[in-house]
Image (spheres, grey):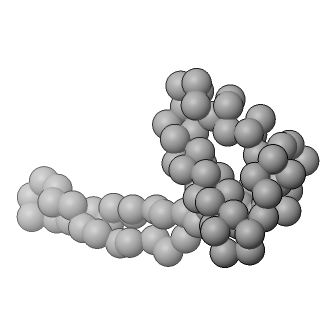
Amino acid sequence: RLPAERAVNPLKFSDKTAAHRIKTGVESAIAKAENNQGADVDELKVQTIMVDEGPTLQRFMARAKGRGTRSLKRTSHITVVVG
């Protein structure tokens, strides 16, 4: 359980590709809690962050001799709980 501000800081400076998307999700959850429930931002804490598998898109890619190979385009769901 990290305070909301401390949870966002490491994500700002991370080189990882997914860090930007997780940071966006955390900031969105903080903004929704402040706007919809009237929560105080200084008292909010990030309780959990979960990444689950989403739907997989199946596409076909052209290969040699008129054949085709299945290409799986995977997606994910990011869930952030603040309280």
Q: Is residue 64 above or below residue 2?
A: below
Q: In this view, does 8 lie above or below 50?
A: above
Looking at the image, can residue 79 be seen?
A: no
| Picture quadrant where residue 29 is located | bottom right
Residue furthest to the left:
66
The residue lying toward the viewer, choosing from 52 and 27, is: 27
34 sits to left or right of 18: right
The residue lying toward the viewer, choosing from 68 and 1, is: 1
- What percent of the width, then of the height, locates residue 83? 85, 62
Residue drawn at x 53%, y 25% is: 15
| Picture quadrant where residue 9 is located | top right
Q: So how many labels did they put on this image?
A: 0
- What percent of the width, then of the height, locates residue 23? 59, 45
Residue drawn at x 68%, y 57% is: 30
70 sits to left or right of 39: left
The residue lying toward the viewer, choosing from 78 and 10, is: 10
Residue drawn at x 9%, y 64% is: 66
| Picture quadrant where residue 34 is located | bottom right
37 sits to left or right of 26: right
53 sits to left or right of 33: left
Looking at the image, can residue 30 be seen?
A: yes
Residue drawn at x 17%, y 56% is: 63
Q: In this view, does 4 lie above or below 69?
A: above
- What percent of the width, then of the height, locates residue 13? 58, 24
Q: Is residue 33 above or below residue 30?
A: below
